[in-house]
Image (spheres, rainbow, N blue to C red):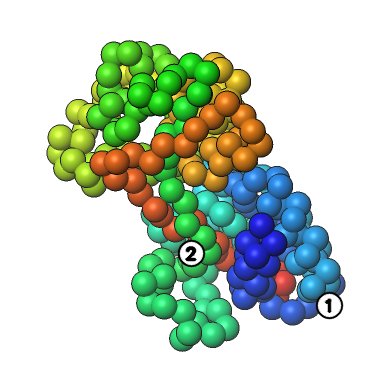
Amino acid sequence: MKRFVVTILCLLLAVSAWAAGGKVVVYTAHEESIINAIVPMFEKETGITVEYVKMASGDVINRAKAEASRPQADVIWSIGGEQLEAENSILAPYTPKDWDKINPVYKVGTNWLPYTGIMNVFVVNTKMLTPDKYPKTWIDLTDARFKKNICSARADKSGSSYMQLCNVIAIYGDKGWDIYEGIMKNTIISASSGAVPKFVNDGEQAVGITLEDNAFRYFAGGGPVAIVYPTDGTVAAPDGIALLKGAPNLENA
């Protein structure tokens, strides 16, 4: 965990200029535990005060778009790279220090930088399902035995839902549309990807489709959950960080 926090802090510092005081406004979909670990370290290192607004990733991008003519924030931190790429016109280009030392495979964004990776998994309640009944593939999630016993996040609120659709289409091509429709028929929609593993942990749903880090929090906390990596394939996508075009505190961002 310490190594993770230090690594992310270094990456955040890589997209920040040194300033004596001042503030930076951040829109983020990150977990509070990560925010609370990194922000104080950043403030101590730079002398810059961080004002952050935590929202679902869909709300982050929608709010930034709505404010594009008069931006209220400086940085978007931790939403899906595919969301940033789709709206890259509201982002400001930035080349961090030592850019030439970064492996080209990670230079995938237009006006945004990947800073970590996120992965789709299934999280299952171990009191509701025995291991032989766990879904092993995306197609398994279409089985009638999971009718209304799967949860996933709203696509307009969470980029992870878009990832799930892309995941199925990438594996199965055009047939993936029918497969995903079958999954949706068995699925209850939650307000956010972070809520999905909580529903499973609490026994409200047997299966959740969510991000690995969301699921791992409950697994590591000793909850009655198991994490399943789909055997037919899963997406590992970049989570991004970006400067907003016209940022009001650009000198601190």
**Amino acid type assigned to the residue bearing label 1 in the image:** Ala
Location of residue 105 in the rendering, given as x and y in whole percent from the top left corner: 36, 72
Q: Which residue is mark 2?
A: 114
Residue 88 appears in the rendering: yes
Mark 2 burial class by Cα count in 10 Å: few <14, some 14-19, many 20+: many
Left or right, 177 with reference to 209: left
Horizontal placement of 234 versus 11: left or right? left
Residue 157 can be seen in this image: no
Quadrant where the image shows the N terminus:
bottom right
Task: Please rate how many residues cluster around mark 1, counting C-alpha atoms within 10 Å: few if below 14, some from 14 to 19, many from 20.
Answer: few
Instruction: Identify which residue is drawn at 21% across, 33% down.
Output: 177
Label of residue 42 in the image:
none
In x, y percent, where is residue 56? 57, 40
Name the residue tied to disc 1: 20
What is the number of callouts on the image? 2
Q: Earlier in the sequence, mark 1 or mark 2?
A: 1
**Residue appearing at x 74%, y 79% in the figure:** 18
Residue 253 screen position, x and y as percent: 67, 70
Between residues 4 and 92, which one lies in front from this camera angle? Answer: 4
**Quadrant in the picture for residue 231:** top left
Amino acid at dot 2: Pro
Q: Nearer the viewer, mark 1 or mark 2?
A: 2
Residue 128 at x, y percent in the picture: 48, 16
User: Between 241 and 64, which is closer to the camera in this rendering?
Assistant: 241
Q: Residue at x 18, y 40 (%)?
A: 172
How far, Cα to Cα, is label 1 from label 2?
27 Å
| Front residue (pair 190, 151) | 151
Q: What secondary structure is marked by label 1? A: loop
Q: Tell me: 4 left or right of 188.
A: right
The vertical placement of 24 against 233, above or below, is below
Q: For numbered disc 2, what is the local secondary structure?
A: strand
